[in-house]
Image: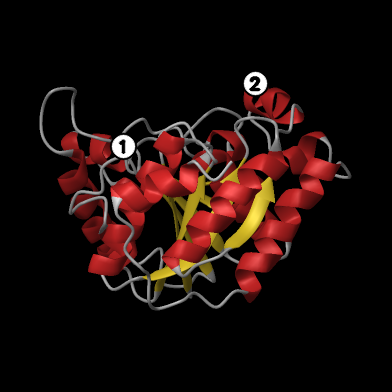
Amino acid sequence: MRNIAIYGKGGIGKSTVACHLAASWGLKGLKVALIGCDPKKDTCMLLTGNNPPKPILEALRNGESIEQCIVKGYANVLCIEVGGPEPGVGCAGRGLLLAFEHLDKLGVLSDLDIIVYDVPGDIVCGGFAIPMKRTNSEVYIVTSGEYLSLYAANGISKAVKKMRSRLGGLILNSSRGNLSEELKIVEAFARALNSKIVGAIPKIPLLKKCSLEGKTIFQVSPRSKGSMIFRNLAETIIANEPREEVNEISDKELLSIINII
């Protein structure tokens, strides 16, 4: 079983990437689960028609079975949202640990080919590092060429190194609309990390329609260029061999990379 954790700065497009990867593999007949680890509980929207499953932590608070929290979405992907504590109460990272304990006891994840985790990456506390610790996990960081996005990516890579996990690579999700310019920056960042770019996603206007309809681009426009981009990314990750060693980059080194253009 492959454990694939998608990290990145808030708003960088992790959920969009995670949904399309899970759907692409599901369409190929693989048994896939997508687990949203963000307290916002919005990971699975594109696979469930904007009708996400009940969060596990909410069910646990109500003394309910978590089996109702596991729903089958588009491409037969099992969709799960961990959720978070009540606002201002408790720790979302600790809640993530609790949710995985219950999922493991239930055994619903044991007979899968791939589990995709969509994880917040602005702050990698002990709880949010749980997907990195899963057996043989691979971490992929979604980033753009913007400073704050790369700053978050650098923090995540440091956590990967500390957890002795494996960095599969970077996924460039263009924020400027100038893919070639961002590519130069993110390529330099990847080299400094001893990593690589596994996919580059340009701005895809059609994704706005997908978001409004709660559908993947495979459903809205299956033969579009955007659809092929996500299919190619999924194939690249399946064939990828993550690297064991990640270099640590200082904030000063990161700034020098940002300023190469």
Nearer to the camera, 127 or 258: 258
Q: Give the x, y percent position of residue 14.
A: 50, 42
Nearer to the camera, 37 or 107: 37
Q: Residue at x 28, y 73 (%)?
A: 164
Identity of the residue furthest to the right in this view: 223
Horizontal side of 133 relative to 71 (left or right) equals left
* Residue 87 against residue 11 in the figure, above or below: above
Mark 1 = which residue? 83
Q: Give the x, y percent position of residue 100.
A: 27, 57
Circle 1: element type: loop
Q: Identify the image quadrant of residue 73.
A: top right
Nearer to the camera, 214 or 10: 10
Q: Residue at x 52, y 29 (%)?
A: 51
Q: Is residue 46 visible?
A: yes
Circle 2: element type: helix
Mark 2 = which residue? 212
Q: Give the x, y percent position of residue 56.
A: 30, 42
Q: In the rendered structure, which disc, 1 or 2, sits on the residue that comes first in sequence?
A: 1
How many other residues sit within 10 Å of disc 1, few (<14), some (14-19) or many (≥20)?
many
